Amino acid sequence: MEKEINVVICSLNSQYIHSSLAPWCLLAGLEEYVRDGINAGVVEGTINEAPRDVLERILSRSPTVVGFCCYIWNITEIFELVKQIKQELCECVIVLGGPEVSYHVGEVLQNTPFVDYVISGEGEKPFAELLLAICGGTEVAGIPGLCYRKGSEIVIAEPYTPCEIPPSPYTKRYFAALNGRIAYLETSRGCPYSCAFCLSGRCGGVRYYDMERVKKELLLLANSGTQTVKLVDRTFNAHRSRANELFRFISRWLHAIRNRIAELQSENTCRSKPQN
Ligand code: B12
Ligand code: SF4
């Protein structure tokens, strides 16, 4: 590794109550595929807060690279932030990813000169490979999904869909940041169908996560202090018997929680009974 770099992965949620899975997936990818030489952190914000506040949180980490998770609800704010980051830190490398930029990359790179790279499709491995190339000063050509300007030309790659299962995003840092907001969980990635109007239909086939991993993650999230865990599978019931197994698991678990709450309530009632 030539030099150590600071990396910020930023996601702007549509409201405070939402959390974003993608930056934590990318961070888990860096831990899996890079390990040393990169100080990476996540900055989550919302589209409703003052852009200056988000900008300050990003700049306070003196980033060499900032990656933005781009969705339909945050793209306007992200383009604005990118411009301001480049004004304050002109050397900072800007990388965009997410569904809002993955499928018309040529247009994005043509219209936004402040953006250095767009990664199309899934990001865990390509983002890690790009950061390794930036650290080592090596060639970026051939990194899957990576799109960029090369002189007057724009290099466009196919959206990346790997065969492997991505590493789990649920680290201690994720839970420290969750802070009671809605938690998201994937039990599979991709969709077996390809409806024309839907971006999830353009991501290749579906990959199912190991059932034991899913159950472990469900319990971790359920015990994290959040009120709501949302499944963000593109089509949760595409595999009927898996979906049934998970429904049974969730309902058994809910039953156990209800019984425990009832137990605690009756213990409290007994304790608080006045003594005769
Ligand atoms: C959660 C969610 C929401 C939440 C928002 C949560 C939040 N953070 O604020 C809510 C419910 C509010 C919502 C609303 C809407 N949503 Co929505 N939503 C999702 C959902 C189900 C999950 C997103 C997720 O976490 N995925 C899991 C992560 C791991 O996958 P990912 O985000 O794609 O990230 C990977 C890659 O994209 C890439 N990547 C992402 N960011 C970055 C950054 C870098 C630097 C790199 C390198 C890579 C990279 O790497 C990641 C890991 O591989 C997706 C469908 C889906 N399953 O993805 C739709 C989805 C994002 N929503 C979609 C749509 C259309 C909408 C609505 C317009 C629906 C409607 N008609 O009302 C609204 C818009 C809201 C608004 N205010 O304008 C579309 C896409 C829109 C778009 N172009 O961004 C999706 C893809 C659904 C679909 N199949 O079409 N949504
Ligand atoms: S996620 Fe739903 S709408 Fe999108 S391709 Fe799959 S089945 Fe069709």
Image (cartoon, rainbow, N blue to C red):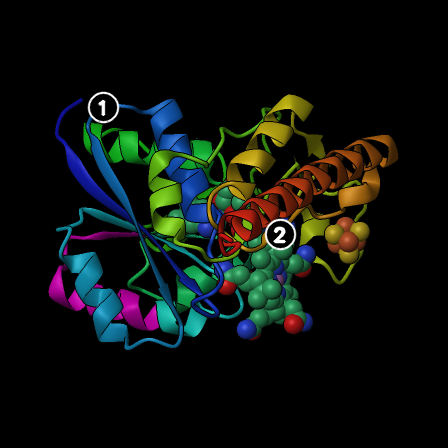
Q: Which amino acid does label 1 sit on?
A: Asp
Q: Quarter of the image holding residue 69?
A: bottom left
Residue 111 lies, with reference to residue 220, above or below; the image says: below
What residue is shown at x 20% (from left), y 60% (from top)?
57
Give the percent coordinates (x, y) of residue 111.
Answer: 40, 69
- Specify the quadrant that holds the N terminus: top left
Q: Kindly tell me whether residue 121 is visible in this rendering.
A: no
Identify which residue, 228 or 82, lies in the foreground: 228
Task: Tell me, for residue 112, which label it has, or none.
Answer: none
Q: Quarter of the image holding residue 52?
A: bottom left
Residue under label 2: 230
Question: Under tag 2, what secondary structure?
Answer: strand
80 part of magenta stretch: yes
What residue is shown at x 58% (from left), y 54% (from top)?
228
| Majority SS type along the magenta span | helix
What residue is shown at x 39% (from left), y 68% (from top)?
46
Identify which residue, 178 or 72, lies in the foreground: 178
Give the percent coordinates (x, y) of residue 33.
Answer: 38, 24
What residue is shown at x 63% (from left), y 31% (from top)?
214
Magenta segment boundaries in residue numbering:
79-94
Residue under label 1: 36
On screen, residue 42 versus residue 268, left or right, reads left
Q: Give me the C-alpha separation between circle 2 and circle 1.
A: 33 Å
Q: Kindly tell me whether residue 83 is visible in this rendering.
A: yes
